[in-house]
Image: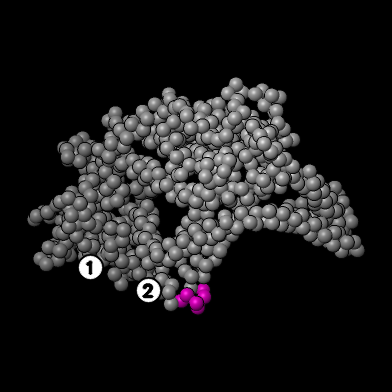
């Protein structure tokens, strides 16, 4: 039920109640100072973690291939040797490749991939071939015999004609009919015997399983370079459509709401009519008069559609739903009219504060900085480990997969016990205290990412709330509004309420990090057989998802109250909660009506721009064939346009939704604080007064 005048007396009027309140408090003090200090300290710590990561990290570890000694191909003294060559590609077929991402065969950085097929035995007898062959050796073999060269693994046993792929040399495989060939030959000599070319396939598959995405990424990048200006044009169209939709809401909001409501009623009525026709048509069909109880459970659900009782059940369910909708419409018609008027008022407010439509760009830039800082820090943290070398051996060895030191490996007991073993680079790790606590630093990085991202979002919400509240409480619009309402609100939020913003975003970040931990535990328990643990984890994930949604809702309204009154976060959250609970029906109606209309707007904008992008980039229409760029994947710009259009529409409509929520809380406060008398006149629009059948008394 609506709250009438004097509701503050009935529900417990707060001590700071001011009957002469007319808008956002200008003389306010700092709120939640302790949380503000904690946030500043956390940011300083975050910067320290970033500096520490940048000092120890090296992104080259994930960009450039690494040889058996842990050196980067194409970097430093190997600058002229950018490609990685595998001594024995067939060793890459080992399952250990998938576990350690490293082939158990010597690897060297080379200037170019071999363009001919040779064996060590044949090359060593020809001066010209031997000079060419030595460029693929780990060290100069000198005049050593073939047996010593192979035993010490100074040179590969054979070379195969190869081509560079993802900065690595892979055999040039082809096909003659159904037979796989390498260098136009069906067989090759591995220095020991003749082998089929198909024996190389398994090794190549495992060697590329981690790197194939890089080739796709390069093609996608090339597509972006060819289509970026058309993508920008499509996104500009999305901006124009979003602005047009918001302007139309000012004049067509009422029509759109009532049309949608009657369309829902019409759809349900059509469903009832369709079910009734099916029910009548099955009257004389054999076997259609049996009951659902007689039929029992059937895995083929289509069988139920041949029974009259099923369609009767559908008719009853849809009829009940139709009656409920009509009854709700009758009793909630006044609240729906209020929601429509508030949406129209929101369009007017956006018109007076036009700069608010472009505020999401500022929020987007801040979020981009937060995301980039988090991503760069995460990469540097993950690459701040040291190279780890392990023992690889072709035969059984007690030291296989153990950590080794390549500098003194030839004199170690490992080499003595396993003469044919090699100490090769395996992966990056470390045993120092810094490396042991890397997981904690990564956790801190993720937590501060959530906290900072939520803070930026909260700052945007409070800034917009303050600007739109100044519109609502201005007796004479726009003369009584600040000259730059958005800038004034942003200044107030940062100067006085950084602590409140940090407090609300901290609570949300804690819940989000718990959800991340639950997802991690769920990933680890995927192979577990304990059904109770899975059920408990599923319940926890569901509960924390609901909790996150509730906290986001409460934070949003708390920030509005902070922007209006300048109180601390907890008091503002409490006041907002009780204010909404006293008007819970209005909250539900307004929330659902607004969400539905904005959802339709997003759907309309994304659909229109997406259809245009599909016909343009796919080349399915003759109208754009001359202008359409040649692409590897035409879905890349289409998906980019779809996602970009949604984000643009969401950005514009989030401003509109924030405006509606702010005006709604101001409207409720206006109803509870004022009574229409000359001293306490309502500040809502005349249309809202007419819907509520209220009026301001003349002086």
Query: Which x, y percent locates residue 351?
Result: 54, 51
Secondary structure state at the residue bearing disc 1? loop
Figure check: 184 above or below 496: below
Q: Residue furthest left?
A: 143
Query: Which stretch is magenta?
Result: 620-625
Residue drawn at x 21%, y 54% is 74
Position of residue 443 in the picture relative to residue 325 (left or right): left
Tell me where residue 320 appears, x and y as whole percent: 82, 48
Q: Out of 400 and 132, give the one closest to the viewer.
A: 132
Distance between mark 1 and mark 2 Cα atoms: 19 Å
The quarter of the image holding the N terminus is top right
Q: Is residue 673 above or below residue 322?
A: above
Quadrant location of residue 87?
bottom left
Disc 2 crowd, CA 10 A, few/some/many (<14, 14-19, 20+)? few
Extreme-front residue of the structure:
699
Residue drawn at 64 percent across, 32 percent down: 679
User: Label 2: which residue?
Assistant: 176
Q: Which mark is residue 116?
A: 1
Report the side of 342 relative to 653 (left or right).
right
Task: Name the disc covering residue 48, or none.
Answer: none
- Dot 1 or dot 2: first in sequence order is 1
Quarter of the image with the C terminus is top right
Does residue 667 appear left or right of residue 653 in this picture? right
Q: Is residue 524 visible?
A: no
Q: Is residue 613 magenta?
A: no
């Amino acid at each position: 039920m609506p709250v009438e005048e004097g509701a503050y007396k009935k529900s417990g009027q707060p001590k700071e109640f001011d009957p002469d309140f007319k808008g956002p408090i200008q003389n306010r003090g700092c709120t939640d100072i302790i949380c503000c200090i904690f946030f500043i300290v956390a940011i300083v710590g975050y910067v320290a973690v970033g500096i520490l990561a940048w000092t120890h990290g090296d992104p080259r570890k994930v960009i450039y291939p690494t040889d058996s000694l842990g050196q980067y191909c194409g970097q430093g003294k190997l600058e002229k040797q950018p490609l990685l060559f595998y001594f024995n590609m067939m060793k890459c077929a080992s399952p250990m490749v998938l576990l350690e991402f490293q082939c158990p065969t010597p690897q060297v950085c080379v200037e170019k991939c071999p363009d001919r097929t040779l064996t060590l035995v044949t090359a060593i007898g020809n001066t010209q071939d031997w000079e060419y062959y030595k460029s693929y050796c780990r060290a100069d073999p000198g005049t050593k015999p073939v047996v010593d060269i192979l035993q010490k693994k100074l040179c590969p046993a054979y070379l195969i004609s190869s081509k560079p792929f993802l900065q690595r040399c892979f055999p040039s495989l082809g096909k003659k009919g159904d037979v796989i060939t390498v260098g136009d030959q069906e067989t090759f000599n591995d220095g020991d015997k003749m082998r089929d070319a198909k024996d190389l396939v398994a090794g190549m598959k495992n060697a590329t399983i981690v790197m194939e995405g890089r080739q796709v990424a390069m093609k996608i990048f090339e597509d972006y370079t060819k289509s970026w200006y058309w993508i920008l044009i499509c996104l500009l169209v999305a901006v124009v459509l979003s602005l047009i939709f918001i302007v139309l809401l000012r004049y067509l909001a009422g029509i759109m709401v009532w049309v949608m409501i009657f369309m829902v009623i019409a759809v349900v009525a059509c469903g009832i009519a369709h079910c009734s026709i099916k029910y009548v048509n099955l009257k004389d069909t054999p076997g259609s008069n049996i009951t659902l109880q007689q039929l029992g459970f059937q895995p083929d659900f289509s069988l139920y559609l041949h029974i009259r009782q099923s369609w009767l059940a559908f008719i009853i369910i849809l009829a009940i739903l139709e009656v409920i909708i009509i009854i709700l419409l009758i009793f909630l018609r006044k609240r729906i009219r209020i929601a429509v008027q508030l949406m129209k008022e929101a369009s007017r407010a956006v018109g007076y504060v036009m700069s608010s439509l472009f505020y999401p760009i500022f929020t987007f830039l801040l979020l981009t900085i937060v995301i980039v800082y988090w991503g760069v820090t995460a990469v540097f943290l993950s690459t701040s480990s040291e190279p780890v070398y392990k023992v690889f051996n072709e035969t059984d060895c007690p030291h296989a997969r153990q950590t080794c030191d390549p500098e003194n490996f030839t004199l170690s007991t490992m080499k003595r016990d396993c003469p044919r073993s090699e100490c090769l680079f395996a992966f990056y790790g470390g045993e120092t205290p810094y490396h042991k606590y890397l997981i904690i630093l990564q956790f801190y990085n993720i937590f501060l990412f959530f906290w900072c991202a939520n803070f930026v979002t909260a700052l945007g919400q409070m800034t917009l709330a303050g600007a739109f509240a100044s519109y609502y409480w201005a007796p004479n619009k726009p003369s009584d509004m600040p000259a730059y309402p958005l800038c004034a609100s942003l200044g107030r939020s940062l100067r006085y309420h950084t602590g409140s913003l940090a407090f609300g975003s901290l609570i949300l970040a804690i819940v989000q990090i718990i959800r991340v931990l639950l997802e991690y535990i769920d990933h680890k328990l995927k192979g577990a057989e304990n059904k109770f643990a899975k059920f408990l984890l599923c319940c926890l994930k569901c509960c924390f998802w609901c909790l996150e949604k509730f906290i986001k809702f409460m934070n949003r309204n708390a920030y509005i109250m902070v922007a209006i009154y300048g109180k601390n976060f907890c008091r503002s959250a409490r006041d907002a909660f009780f204010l909404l609970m006293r008007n819970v029906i209005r909250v539900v109606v307004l929330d659902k009506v607004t969400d539905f209309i904005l959802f339709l707007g997003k759907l309309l904008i994304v659909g229109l721009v997406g259809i245009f992008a599909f016909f343009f980039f796919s080349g399915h229409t003759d109208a754009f064939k001359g202008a359409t760029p040649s692409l590897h994947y035409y879905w890349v710009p289409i998906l980019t346009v779809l996602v970009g259009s949604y984000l643009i529409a969401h950005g514009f409509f989030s401003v509109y939704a924030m405006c509606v929520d702010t005006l709604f809380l101001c409207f409720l406060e206006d109803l509870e604080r004022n009574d229409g008398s000359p001293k306490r006149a309502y500040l809502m629009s005349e249309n809202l007064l007419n819907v509520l059948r209220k009026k301001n008394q003349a002086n």
